[in-house]
Amino acid sequence: MYDNRNNKCIYCDPQYIVNDRYTEREVTYVHPIVHVNREHIVYVPRHVYEEHIINEVIDPGYPDGCGCNKKKSCGWSWI
């Protein structure tokens, strides 16, 4: 029969049997939200009026006559 003492053992590569197990672990993801409050300046016209008073004297010059249609002599009529 077989004599085990003379036989050599041959080892093969191992076969792996994997039993996967999952454990939940919480991971925090931060999503920042930035609120921006903007104030826009809109220029609106405001009309302001400055008043100035100017006094003018209009001199038409020395009159040529009395302004009537009758022509009188320049002499004294009562003498």
Image (spheres, helix red, strand yellow):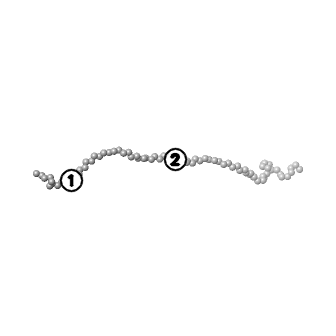
**Mark number, residue 12:** 1
Q: Which residue is mark 2?
A: 38
| Image marks 1 and 2: residues in contact by CB distance under 8 Å | no
* Amino acid type shown at disc 1: Cys
Residues 17 and 70: in front is 17
Left or right: 69 in relation to 2? right
**Residue found at the far left of this picture:** 1
The single residue placed furthest to the front in the displayed view is 5
| Percent coordinates x, y for residue 71 in the rendering | 80, 50
Q: Nearer the viewer, residue 52 or 57?
A: 52
What residue is at 22 percent from the left and 53 percent from the top?
Answer: 13
Q: Amino acid at mark 2?
A: Arg
Within 10 Å of the Cα at label 2, are there few (<14), some (14-19), or many (20+) other Cα atoms?
A: few
Q: Is residue 45 left or right of residue 60?
A: left
Give the residue at x 40% y 46%: 28
Q: Earlier in the sequence, mark 1 or mark 2?
A: 1
